[in-house]
Image (cartoon, coloured by chain):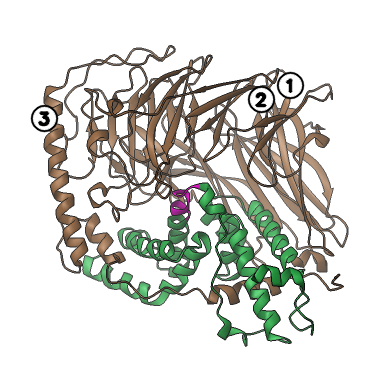
Chain colours: A green, B brown
């Protein structure tokens, strides 16, 4: 393909999918600057490998595969103890009227905050699996391909991650229950 | 306060995750930050500068200047180099080939890293199977080219190079997705020629699992089918472990595949497993096979996990079985109560029928070796403390070698006696990089100051056969943000005394040794060239002569992404 056409194609892909690609990068890296870097590197690689893209398959999935590898590699470049350091995620308070948010809105905010912090505390491959599964909607085989593991292991990783998040969320009542946030949740927010 | 509420189901968790991730948006582009367009321009210095920012143009000019300097310096060193060089001796390795000769393909080029550099005869093997992105490809050291991805060899597959230089893949595809969870798996043996072109496809196995309809099982939508591929130590036999849910039972087994003929030589059934009580569904993964050191017997490891519906608590374990490596269809439960509590990182058999399991700790910080002798006795566990930053290990005979790449510490555990011993290499010095080896001089001029992977895959290799050395990749982490490769460290296998250090030519992330032990291959990751434009380069493979550590070949522009060796030994 002509270079100029390729540039235009990747430009279009960037306009359409940059936010989604960034989310996968951020889920893995939990670092906005690093995620931006990984996003642009992913599109640069997409440009270089454009001939390998099969137009019969979703472009989004192809880009997610690239950015997952880029972000996991970037992650591996850091010291392990940096990875273990918890990162407080930002929370979009304005979105508390989202789908499924019933009852006390403050509880829903707390639940999201707990999930965000819970995600930060997971291992990177578990974070990636959670976001690839629940945000991007990939099946286990696709996630296994992205993470270079088996679908069975993806199932195990997801179940363990769910258990961790459930444990954290279990400290507070469901969003539609009128209750005061328990001490454990307030402690998490402090 | 106690909460009498139903556990949070997967749909609720998914919604919360989506809500959280919806808050993650790509920030506005900073004017000083390079965009994807800037990056591709830097990777293609000969192209037009259209679309480049000021940073890109400046970096590009710098890169060109440095590249020219390096190229000219390299030529000068090349011309003046003394032929041959004393160095460490790998006791088991045959003598090096005759002295360096003119590059067969091309000499040093005015690029940041050469497409091909050869120092003497072409190393054998001269083609190398690499994992690239989500598949596999063959790199040709003679041309410096990376071939196309092997057809059908997806990330779920496992490819091996056969003794005749061709390739065989136990290729796995999965579909029949229900709520994200596969219900169908197909396994094929695919054969490729030496250049990586597909020559034959043989169906090996086809598996369909059923959904678990119980409410508790829907909490996590676990996979309904699973497949795992492993190989015998000489890679002539492939083991396809499979598992599928069939009503109230998990069924599973192992196929033994002759990799030369594609014939399923044996089918081994594993005991059925109950899907568990309604409030705690059990999931069973495909079994993996580790052939013992004597090549006669094999240890089968089959992981299981479950989630308690009421509490959401996660439980995991691994069943073990012993079977003949040739796969006669008999199995006996073995060492079930000596498996790891928090997860199994590795497992195997010594030649004395001692099963061993390398167990993760729940906090991920340490490893424990658990041993189970054939007579059912109990041996004390062995704690391994040397698996800090990027710790990696290799098994040889009845020993496990643990390598800590930052501290350059190597530990050996004798699995039979439990005896441990240690060694360490001194920190590399500047003189390590200034030898007369002309290609090695690249390490001085283009020392990879960009980041190295923390996790090395593989990061340690024991010389094949009766070889008496161990090779390992080092990392310097004095820069907390960007650790870098410190090259290859060589140890005496018996005494663990350091024998030598070979300077890196790239940001090494993967290590392998030729089947005859004569050559050591190190794969370098691509460097984006964002932080250090002059170091812009693709992924690479560097070949060292095992007899003296001299660089025998470099293929330096393989792919924009990462590469790693598909196996530790290259036949």
Please identify, in this view, whether the residue under mark 3 or under mark 2 is nearer the observer: 3
Task: Say which chain tag 2 marks.
Answer: B
- Label 1 and label 2: CA atoms lie apart by 8 Å
Residue highlighted by disc 2 = B292
Which is more foreground, mark 1 or mark 3? 3
| Residue at 43%, 20% in the rendered image | B516
Picture quadrant of residue B317: top right
Work out whether residue A146 or residue A186 is closer to the camera in this orientation and state it.
A186
Q: Position of residue B570 (x, y in %)?
A: 44, 29
- Residue A77 screen position, x and y as percent: 44, 49
| The image quarter in which residue B128 lies | top left
Sooner in the amino-acid sequence: mark 1 or mark 2? 2
**Spatial separation of the CA atoms under disc 1 and disc 3:** 57 Å
Which residue does the image show at 36% across and 58% down from the upper left? A52
Disc 3: which chain?
B
Residue B457 x/y as whole percent: 49, 39
* Residue that badge 3 annotates: B76
Of the image marks 3 and 2, the number of the one nearer the N terminus: 3
Q: Earlier in the sequence, mark 1 or mark 3?
A: 3
Residue position marked by numbered label 1 in the rendering: B353
């Amino acid at each position: 393909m002509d270079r100029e056409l390729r540039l235009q194609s990747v430009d279009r892909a960037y306009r359409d999918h940059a936010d989604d690609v960034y989310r996968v990068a951020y889920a893995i890296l939990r670092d906005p600057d690093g995620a931006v870097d990984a996003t642009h590197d992913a599109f640069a690689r997409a440009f270089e490998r454009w001939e390998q893209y099969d137009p019969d398959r979703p472009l989004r999935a192809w880009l997610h595969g690239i950015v997952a590898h880029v972000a996991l590699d970037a992650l591996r470049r850091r010291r392990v103890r940096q990875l273990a350091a918890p990162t407080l995620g930002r929370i979009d308070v304005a979105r508390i009227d989202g789908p499924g948010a019933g009852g006390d809105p403050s509880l829903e905010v707390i639940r999201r905050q707990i999930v965000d912090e819970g995600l930060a505390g997971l291992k990177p491959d578990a974070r990636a699996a959670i976001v690839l599964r629940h945000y991007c909607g990939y099946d286990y085989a696709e996630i296994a391909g992205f993470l270079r593991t088996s679908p069975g292991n993806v199932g195990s990783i997801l179940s363990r991650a769910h258990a961790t998040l459930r444990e954290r969320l279990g400290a507070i009542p469901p969003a539609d229950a009128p209750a005061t946030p328990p001490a454990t949740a307030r402690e998490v927010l402090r | 306060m106690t909460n009498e509420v139903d556990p949070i189901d997967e749909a609720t968790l998914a919604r919360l995750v989506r809500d959280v991730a919806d808050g993650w948006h790509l920030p506005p582009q900073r004017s000083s930050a390079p965009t994807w367009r800037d990056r591709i321009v830097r990777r293609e210095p000969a192209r037009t500068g259209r679309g480049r920012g000021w940073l890109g143009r400046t970096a590009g000019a710098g890169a060109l200047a440095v590249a020219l300097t390096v190229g000219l310096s390299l030529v000068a060193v090349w011309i003046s180099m003394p032929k041959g060089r004393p160095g460490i001796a790998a006791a088991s390795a045959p003598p090096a080939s005759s002295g360096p000769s003119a590059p067969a393909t091309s000499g040093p080029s005015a690029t940041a890293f050469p497409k091909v550099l050869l120092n003497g005869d072409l190393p054998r093997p001269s083609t190398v199977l690499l994992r690239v992105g989500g598949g596999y490809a063959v790199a040709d050291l003679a041309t410096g080219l990376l071939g196309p991805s092997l057809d059908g060899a997806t990330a779920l597959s496992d490819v091996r190079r056969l003794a005749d230089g061709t390739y065989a893949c136990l290729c796995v595809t999965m579909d029949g997705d229900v709520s994200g969870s596969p219900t169908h798996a197909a396994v094929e043996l695919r054969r490729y020629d030496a250049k990586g072109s597909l020559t034959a496809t043989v169906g090996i196995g086809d598996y369909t699992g059923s959904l678990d309809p119980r409410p508790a099982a829907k909490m996590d939508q676990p996979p309904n089918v699973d497949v795992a591929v492993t190989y015998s130590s000489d890679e002539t036999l492939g083991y396809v472990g499979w598992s599928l849910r069939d009503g109230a039972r998990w069924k599973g087994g192992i196929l033994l595949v002759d990799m030369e003929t594609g014939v399923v030589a044996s089918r081994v059934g594993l005991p059925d497993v109950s899907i568990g009580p309604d409030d705690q569904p059990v999931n069973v993964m495909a079994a993996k096979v580790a052939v013992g050191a004597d090549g006669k017997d094999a240890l089968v490891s089959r992981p299981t996990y479950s989630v308690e519906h009421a509490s959401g608590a996660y439980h995991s374990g691994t069943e073990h079985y012993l079977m003949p490596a040739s796969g006669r269809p008999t199995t006996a439960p073995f060492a079930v109560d000596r498996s790891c509590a928090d997860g199994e990182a590795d497992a195997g058999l010594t030649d004395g029928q001692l099963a061993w399991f390398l167990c993760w700790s729940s906090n991920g910080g340490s490893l424990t070796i658990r041993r189970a002798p054939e007579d059912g006795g109990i041996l004390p566990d062995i704690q391994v403390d040397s698996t800090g930053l990027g710790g990696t290990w290799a098994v040889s005979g009845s020993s496990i070698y643990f390598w800590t790449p930052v501290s350059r510490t190597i530990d050996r555990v004798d699995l039979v006696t439990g005896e441990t011993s240690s060694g360490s290499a001194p920190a590399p010095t500047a003189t390590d990089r200034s030898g007369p080896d002309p290609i090695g001089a690249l390490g001085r001029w283009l020392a990879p100051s960009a980041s190295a992977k923390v996790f090395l895959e593989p990061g340690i290799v024991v010389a094949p056969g009766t070889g008496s050395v161990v090779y390992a990749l080092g990392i310097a982490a004095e820069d907390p943000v960007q650790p870098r490769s410190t090259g290859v460290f060589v140890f005496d296998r018996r005494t663990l005394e350091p024998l030598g250090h070979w300077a890196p030519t790239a940001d090494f992330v993967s290590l392998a040794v030729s089947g005859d032990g004569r050559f050591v291959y190190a794969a370098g990751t691509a460097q984006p060239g964002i932080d250090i434009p002059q170091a812009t380069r693709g992924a690479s493979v560097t070949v060292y002569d095992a007899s003296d550590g001299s660089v025998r070949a470099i293929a330096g522009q393989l792919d924009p992404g990462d590469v790693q060796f598909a196996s530790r030994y290259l036949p």
